[in-house]
Image (cartoon, rainbow, N blue to C red):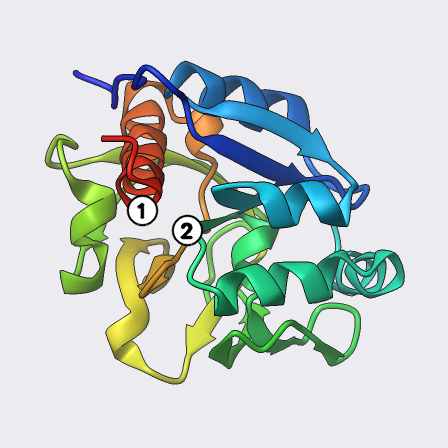
Amino acid sequence: MTVGAPSHVPPRVAVVDYGMGNLASVAKALARSGADVRVTQSAAEVRGAAGVVLPGVGAFGDAAARLEQTGLGAVVLERIAAGTPFLGVCLGLQLLFESSSEGGRRPGLGVLGGTVELLPTDLKVPHIGWNDLEWGPAGAGMARGLPAPAIVYFVHSYAALPTDPAVVAATTDYGGRVVAAVARDNVWAVQFHPEKSSAVGLQLLGNFVATIRQEAGLS
């Protein structure tokens, strides 16, 4: 499998460090995909990056509070509004929505309409393990060069319920259909962990880096 190769000048990608997430593994995987990665708490560095990644592991309410307290949530919204290529990973996907029921109803960033709810399944929660993806039209950019089926690694108890079905880029089956990825314009987000999903995850991250290169005029 061919991962997006780095150009002569690798694009700068800011991995937002707001105190929650497996930042080292995400940064390492992005670097392997051809990015110049900066794990940062600096608003100026996020503003100066050609692409922005918001990872996250943990409770929705804590994450939303830290984004607000640090001011990084406002910077993320600013960069998304400016058209900067953006990737949310796991909790970083959930935070894009209007609210989550985890720990009581908590507000999110509101980039996408809809809520985040406990997985509606009789199967074991949290959902931990490998599942295949079913892609929709919104996921064409993410899915470029991926095998069929594309099998990825999940660790989550909650999932997004978008208001607009057109933003659903991929679903998976876990006792019913579960949103696995969303996309709209410059915003991509995945519920699974690409940095833990072997060659499939690296290819997806390579696709993201390739879009950054294109937007930055580096390819």
Return the mark for residue 21: none
Mark 2 surroundings: few (<14), some (14-19) or many (≥20) residues within 10 A: many
- Residue 176 visible? The answer is no
Q: Earlier in the sequence, mark 2 or mark 1?
A: 2
Labels 2 & 1 near each other (Cβ < 8 A): yes
Q: Is residue 183 above or below residue 22?
A: below
Q: Quadrant of residue 106?
A: bottom right
Identity of the residue drawn at 13% across and 30% down: 147
Q: Residues within 10 Å of mark 1 (few under 14, many from 20)?
A: some
Where residue 46 appears, as percent x and y from the top left, is 65, 45
The quarter of the image holding the N terminus is top left
Report the disc number at residue 85.
2
Which image quadrant for residue 17? top right
Q: Amino acid at mark 2?
A: Pro
Locate residue 136, reporting x and y percent: 17, 61
The type of residue carrying mark 1 is: Glu
- Residue at (47%, 27%) from the top-left corner? 195
Left or right of 169 on screen, residue 27: right
Give the residue furthest to the right.
69
The one nearer the camera, 41 or 10, is 10
Horizontally, residue 69 falls left or right of residue 203, namely right
Q: How many marks?
A: 2
